[in-house]
Amino acid sequence: MQNDLLLQYTEAFDRGDFDAMEAIHNRCADIPGLDEAIASLHARFDSGESFTEQLVRYRDGLQQRGEKAGPGHD
């Protein structure tokens, strides 16, 4: 299974798992662009809706256009 840190982050965010979110934040030093991608989630996504569902929809749109999903998604 591929490592998908952004998906793991949104799942942790949705369930309020701050320990898991912190563990992913700690990986930012090792993965260029991951911290910017996480910040972008918070800036672009509606906090009243599941971040995971929003990420999946966003990625589906990228895939339909043939674009890459971004850092933290192998």
Image (spheres, rainbow, N blue to C red):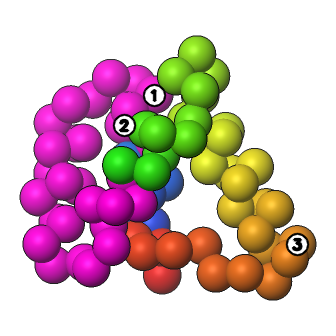
Q: Which image quarter: residue 10?
A: top left
Q: Per the image, is 61 magenta?
A: no
Query: Which residue in the protein does label 3 denote?
Result: 64
- The image quadrant of residue 51 is top right
Above or below: residue 19 compared with residue 58:
above
Identify the mark at residue 12; answer none if there is no mark: 2
Left or right: where does residue 10 sit relative to residue 63? left
* Secondary structure beneath label 1: helix
Q: What element carries label 2?
A: helix
In the foreground, 44 or 2: 44
Region rendered in magenta: 10-38
Report the amino acid beneath label 3: Gln
Find the residue positioned furthest to the right.
Answer: 64
On the question of residue 1 being in view, the answer is no
Distance of label 2 from label 3 (alpha carbons): 26 Å
Residue 71 location, x and y as percent?
42, 74
Q: How crowded is mark 3: few (under 14 residues within 10 Å), some or many (20 or more)?
A: few
Residue 14, numbered circle: 1
State the residue lying farthest toward the front. 43
Q: Is residue 51 visible?
A: yes
Contact between marks 1 and 2 (CB within 8 A): the answer is yes
Q: Are marks 2 and 3 in contact (CB under 8 Å)?
A: no
Q: Left or right of 64: which side holds 30? A: left
